[in-house]
Image: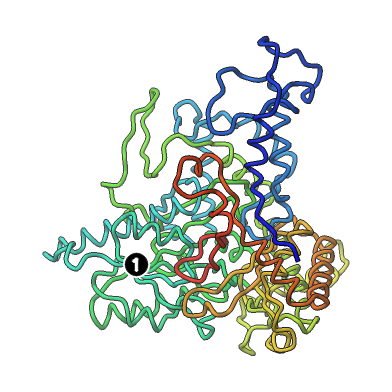
Amino acid sequence: MSLGRHIDPEDIIHHLESVRPPSKSTNKPHHLTAYSTPYTSQRDIPKYEIPREGAPSDTVYSMINDELDLDGRPNLNLASFVDTYLDPNARKLFTSNLAKNLADNDEYPALLSMSERCVSILANLWGASKSEHAVGSPTVGSSEAVHLAGLSLKRRWQAKMKAQGKSIHEPGPNIIMGSNAQVALLKFARYFEVDARILPVSEKSDFCLDPDLVRENVDENTIGVFVILGSTYTGHYEPVERICQLLDEIQKEKGWDVDVHVDAASGGFVAPFTYAGAGQKWNFELPRVKSINVSGHKYGLVTPGIGWIVWRDEKYLPEELIFELHYLGGTEKSYTLNFSRPGAQVVVQYYNLIHLGFGGYREIMENCLANARVLSRGLEETGWYTCVSDIHRPVKSNSVTGRIKAAAETVTGSGTGGEEEEEKETSAGYTPGLPVVSFRFTDEFKQEFPHIKQEDVSLLLRARQWIIPNYALPPNEDKTEILRVVIRESMSFDLLDRLVTDIVQVTEQLIDHDEVDLSIMRKQRGRKHPNRKTDKGKGESVKEKVGEEVKRLNGGIHRSVC
């Protein structure tokens, strides 16, 4: 058996460049097509330094477009909650408003008006009281929105402590969240100097924030609790109402008034429209919920990046955080972390809200949940997989609330034109949650085929263009790995059928392979791509770095599944 050696592709490219004959002409090349210039075979596209001279626009476009072909197909990226589809009219509005700056309100008053309307629509959708004056703002995404909400929690806590003559520095503020929280929540705590009390999750708590642990960890320095309406791991809704009730009890017992911010990045556009709802109160109907954020570019059905933050009343947004800006002839009040930002997403968000209306959003979200139930049942029918998510399981209680029953009757019992509509299954009666399917190998499968790893399923599906991540559950439960599929608007039933077929075929392929083949495949996956610019001039050789393996993510806040 001959010894093998590692071949560095970067070394090969460098060698080919060194032996390439120099160009005889110094004039800019004449070309007939994008591929008839020296960049096709004689010259490399500059990557890390700006070139001395430019290149023909059609050539640069073609080169960049060809490189981007190496990316995955957005519609088959089932790892992401981010929307990938816009209808033709939404695309027209998006394109025609690309150049509008949302910060320039004096120049674009109609854009500002649409933004204010969206805030009002969301406040009403989330149960804002007519006796209060809800305020809010568009953001670049839920990350910015969470930071703004957290900062307002901190400032209100500081004002309260100062009024009581207590220190705001010793021991300092803390905020409570589950270890299933998305990284934006942890970023807030780190960037704004708040102690993050990250509570472990468990199967008992559906891998979500456990109210019992909240009780044990809250104190007078707790500025608030981040409660997630739709965990990115399994799609479960955290028990907002139960946590609010618990905090009410704590206030009666100890006098600590702790507010709640609901991170509804995904659930804020799902729960209000589905027949299952959230299975509980979660919004401004609960007095302790002071603010809610949502990502418009997720189930709001807008492309990145647009988010929204709404406070139930303007008194919960401290005045010292609001800037009065005099810009380009106008005066505006602003509370954002960004200034100049695109306004086209706001236009598309308003278009969706008006075009789809409540009924349109309900139809889309119900379709997503129906497809998620089909996928869940199909996976469990194989006997190879079991679902960690629960949206396909009937509600645990035998008594379904009157609200859900009434909603179900509305869709199944009404008719038009004197004709009864065909009875249609809805999410009523099923466990509420996001249209997310998180699944793993059954214990029996793992015992029979111990050499097969779930990451192999993810890798082979990637070869078929599906992007389905495999990762560990949050700390304390990280011995369990899950594959996760996010069902979005563009996941049709036919595409779902293809996905189930591919998962079955990939699993059968793995069963037919032996352990040696699979170990080679995993080792190949663990290679890191060298970077010519960052590796040049350092003490280590690129060859030494190529062999490093990417560590399995099993600690801290999960960073790659938003």
Q: Is residue 392 visible?
A: yes
Q: Position of residue 121 (x, y in %)?
A: 54, 51
Q: Residue drawn 61% across and 58% down?
A: 527
The front one of 182 and 243 is 182
- Label 1: few (<14), some or many (≥20) within 10 Å? some
Q: Residue drawn 52% across and 77% down?
A: 478
Location of the C terminus (image quadrant): bottom right
Look at the picture and state if 545 lies above or below 42: below
Q: Residue drawn 51% across and 71% down?
A: 554
Q: Is residue 405 visible?
A: no
State how many labels appear.
1
Q: Position of residue 372 (x, y in %)?
A: 72, 69
The front one of 23 and 274 is 23
Look at the picture and state if 138 lies above or below 214: above
Q: Please, which residue is most extreme toward the front here? A: 2
Describe the element under mark 1 as helix, strand or loop.
Answer: strand
From the viewer's perspective, tell me whether residue 84 is left or right of residue 492. left
Q: Residue drawn 41% across and 37% down?
A: 339
Look at the picture and state if 102 lies above or below 390: above
Q: Which residue is mark 1?
A: 196
Location of the N terminus (image quadrant): bottom right
Q: Amino acid at mark 1?
A: Ala
Q: Position of residue 211 (x, y in %)?
A: 42, 80
